[in-house]
């Protein structure tokens, strides 16, 4: 058989079912071999977009996503999306073709190893036919164990060589031990001591806790310690329907009540949350707290530059079960934040309709989020985009649903619709919606056509302020001319229809409700261009740019 | 770096305004969230200040040096400090001068200075820090006017004397 077939066979053995990318001379044989083995191929309009989709696929599936490019220029297109995936710690394998081994005069030659290093990507080379399977296994092993993107670079001449049939391939999963790690009893003891000496405990649940399905154990610990439950941005709204003492996101996106209450904490228990500087505001959000951290990582330095007072390295479910059992056996039970007064403060609405201030033909972005949350059922997942507009959704969406946020992952605009497409594919074509800005959406507009071509039921809600919203507000605060950040856009509803999907441009809440109803009734690729006012500044921007205590 | 340039019109005679503004305890009582600590042999003293940046409260501790030229009714204040977590440092240098106002029995306080914030908080507050300081300056101006008019800003709290200043927080 040919090496490209052997490589395709190994990818299938690694569990590859969906591949995003663009075909070229140096990967077309491999893609054909994949197609013959039943792998679904998603031909995109830009290699970087394909990587964004593979990133979204992996974040949802919890296993390596796969993107493919041809040699040289195809690889070069990956740059921005690859760094995003790296910052998000996404397990991903990029199968990249390469010009013939050693032919540095080839038109499409690129030093792909150096390029991979520059874009924060691991690199594995298929340098010999007899090492091809080992290269695939290593790429997937590194991707899974280091939770990062790996470029598997395969020269086209090596791919076309003859090789022995592969029937002994050992998937990388066989090399990774399974089973839950048990917590160190001394660490549990130390954590008990900290909790016993505390009066106001906060539990912060992160993406790791959600993946470990540790919700039940978190709620039990919360009940025993009288804790407030907060989440990281990546676990937004998780468990919010299961406890009255849920304060939303810890960090800049927390509301004023949450910020005030969290600063009163004298103990923080992090579960599957790294407590980076976003979550704890460099430590300023918890000035008087001691930290207990439960995580599977060998060690973590938190966003305040310190390590936890008690670090429990273990699986979330096991550690929480053990910690709660230890507290029970010591009869440690706190009222903590679970008081009528705190409950009253937490039930106040974040933004009431009376506060909405649109303009003629332009909606208040807060009202848009309010309508979206009301009209879109909880089983339809949400992806949060970028720019100033994303602050409104990040703070104001209240309904419990799967939420994926790309905030803090390199700060690149334009990624969220791509992540959403990949996420939908990973979820078996289950509908999802993304709230994105106009500049972001237009950056990768052609991929809406990709979604239409594969009938991917994505709803893209474009919060259209006809400009670069973040720069508009930052320019104003810096004394620059905000009008330079204004960029008119055409009506995007008809554009979406022209590309083969559904579309509407809306200027009132009723028009928005009608457009949403149409999508919810029969989900299909849809763009709703929502015209919003630039007059409303988000709460994070009011804090950061104007120092407001809001 | 944040620049301060402020002219405060005070409806009190210059001599009285100078009396207030040259007394650290009186000045501190005009700053919400400020406290004076121990005085040192070299004339400097300790101080703390709780500042709200957005919804986050940060407590700074500083060594403050106050140099006064009574004849010119001019003072120079410098402070160097950091927050309790040692993640953020600040340096402040300011001069202030009391001059006659636009009528009898009125004064103007001319303040100019610079504040530099470095460290973690600098990234956190972005341009909001300048706004916060402008807001604090405005509050200080209002409080100074009241203090000079003889209003006891914090009647429930005692103000210490001698080498140890204890001022309201």
Image (spheres, coloured by chain):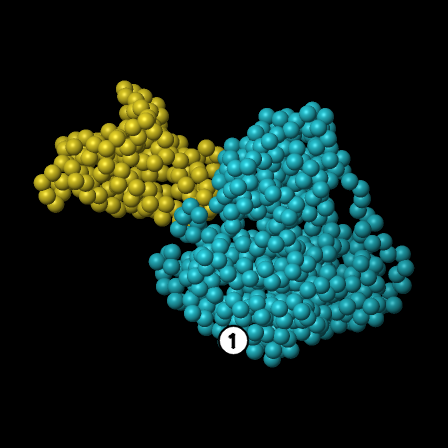
In the image, A471: left or right of A445? Answer: left
Task: Find residue B149 and report its image quarter.
Answer: top left
Chain the render paints yellow: B
In the image, A338 versus B90, the foreground residue is A338
x and y, in percent, of residue A38 in the image:
82, 68
Chain the render paints cyan: A
Residue found at the very far bottom of the displayed protein: A498
Callout 1: SS = loop
Q: Is residue A121 shown to the viewer in this render? A: no
Residue found at the very far top of the displayed protein: B162
The answer for which chain carries disc 1 is A
Q: Quadrant of the C terminus of chain B?
A: top left
For the point 70% across and 56% down, the residue is A60
For the point 51% across and 47% down, the residue is A348
Instruction: Check the image and report above or below for B43 versus A100.
Output: above
In the image, A54 versus A188, the foreground residue is A188
In the image, B124: left or right of A421? Answer: left
Task: Find residue A384 and report its image quarter.
Answer: bottom right
Q: Is residue A541 shown to the viewer in this render? A: yes
Q: Residues within 10 Å of mark 1 (few under 14, many from 20)?
A: some
For the point 59% across and 60% down, the residue is A374
x and y, in percent, of residue A433 in the image:
63, 63
Instruction: Check the image and report above or below for B48 versus A387.
Output: above
In the image, A499: left or right of A214? Answer: left
List the residue tagged with mark 1. Answer: A491
x and y, in percent, of residue A325 in the image:
73, 30
For the point 56% across and 35% down, the residue is A339
């Amino acid at each position: 058989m040919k090496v490209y077939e052997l490589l395709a066979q190994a990818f299938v053995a690694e569990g590859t079912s969906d591949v995003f990318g663009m075909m070229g001379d140096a990967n077309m044989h491999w893609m054909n071999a994949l197609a013959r083995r039943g792998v679904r191929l998603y031909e995109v309009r830009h290699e970087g977009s394909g990587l964004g989709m593979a990133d979204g696929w992996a974040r949802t599936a919890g296993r390596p996503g796969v993107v493919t490019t041809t040699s040289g220029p195809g690889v070069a297109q990956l740059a921005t999306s690859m760094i995003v995936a790296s910052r998000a710690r996404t397990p991903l394998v990029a199968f990249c073709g390469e010009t013939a081994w050693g032919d540095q005069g080839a038109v499409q030659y690129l030093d792909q190893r150096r390029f991979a290093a520059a874009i924060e990507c691991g690199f594995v080379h298929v340098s010999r036919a007899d090492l091809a399977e080992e290269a695939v296994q290593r790429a997937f092993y590194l991707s899974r164990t280091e939770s990062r993107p790996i470029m598997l670079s395969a020269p086209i001449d090596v791919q076309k060589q003859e090789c022995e049939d592969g029937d002994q391939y050992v998937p990388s999963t066989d090399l990774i031990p399974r089973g839950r790690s048990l917590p160190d009893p001394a660490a549990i003891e130390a954590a008990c001591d900290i909790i016993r000496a505390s009066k106001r405990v906060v539990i912060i649940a992160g993406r790791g806790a959600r993946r470990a399905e540790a919700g039940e154990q978190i709620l039990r610990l919360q009940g025993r310690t009288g804790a407030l439950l907060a989440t990281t941005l990546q676990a937004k709204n998780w468990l919010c329907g299961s406890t009255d003492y849920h304060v939303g996101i810890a960090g800049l996106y927390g509301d004023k009540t949450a910020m005030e209450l969290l600063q009163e904490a004298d103990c923080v228990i992090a579960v599957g949350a790294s407590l980076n500087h976003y979550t704890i505001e460099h430590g300023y959000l918890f000035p008087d707290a001691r930290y207990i951290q439960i995580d599977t990582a060998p060690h973590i330095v938190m966003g305040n530059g310190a390590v936890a007072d008690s670090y429990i390295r273990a699986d979330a479910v096991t550690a929480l079960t053990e910690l709660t059992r230890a507290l029970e056996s010591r009869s440690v039970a706190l009222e903590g934040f679970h008081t009528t007064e705190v409950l009253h403060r937490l039930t106040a609405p974040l933004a009431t309709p009376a506060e909405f201030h649109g303009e003629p033909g332009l909606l208040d972005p807060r009202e848009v989020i309010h309508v979206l949350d009301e009209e879109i059922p909880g089983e339809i997942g949400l992806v949060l985009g970028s720019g100033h507009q994303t602050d409104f959704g990040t703070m104001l969406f209240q309904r419990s649903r799967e939420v994926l946020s790309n905030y803090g992952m390199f700060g690149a605009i334009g990624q969220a619709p791509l992540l959403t497409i990949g996420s939908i594919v990973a979820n078996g074509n289950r509908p999802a919606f993304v709230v994105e800005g106009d500049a972001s959406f237009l950056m990768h507009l052609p991929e809406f056509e990709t979604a239409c071509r594969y009938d991917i039921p994505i709803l893209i809600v474009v919060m259209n302020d006809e400009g670069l919203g973040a720069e508009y507000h930052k320019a104003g605060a810096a004394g620059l001319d905000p009008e330079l950040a204004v960029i008119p856009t055409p009506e995007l509803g008809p554009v979406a229809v022209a590309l083969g999907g559904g579309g509407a441009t809306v200027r009132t809440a009723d028009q928005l409700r009608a457009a949403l109803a149409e999508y919810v009734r029969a989900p299909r690729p849809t763009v709703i261009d929502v015209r919003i006012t630039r007059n409303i500044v988000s709460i994070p921007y009011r804090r950061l740019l104007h120092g407001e205590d809001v | 770096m944040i620049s301060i340039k402020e002219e405060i019109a005070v409806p009190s005679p210059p001599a009285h305004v100078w009396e207030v503004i040259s007394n650290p305890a009186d000045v501190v009582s005009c700053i919400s969230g400020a406290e004076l600590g121990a005085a040192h042999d070299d004339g400097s003293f300790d101080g703390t200040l709780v500042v709200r940046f957005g919804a986050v409260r940060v407590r700074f501790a500083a060594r403050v040096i106050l140099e006064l030229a009574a004849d010119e009714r001019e003072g120079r204040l410098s402070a160097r400090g950091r927050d309790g977590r040692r993640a953020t440092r600040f340096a402040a240098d300011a001069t202030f001068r009391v001059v006659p106002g636009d009528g009898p029995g009125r004064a103007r306080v001319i303040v100019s200075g610079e504040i530099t914030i470095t460290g973690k908080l600098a990234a956190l507050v972005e341009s909001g820090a300048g706004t916060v300081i402008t807001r604090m300056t405005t509050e200080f101006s209002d409080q100074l006017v009241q203090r000079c008019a003889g209003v006891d800003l914090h009647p429930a709290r005692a103000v210490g004397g001698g080498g140890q200043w204890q001022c309201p927080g």
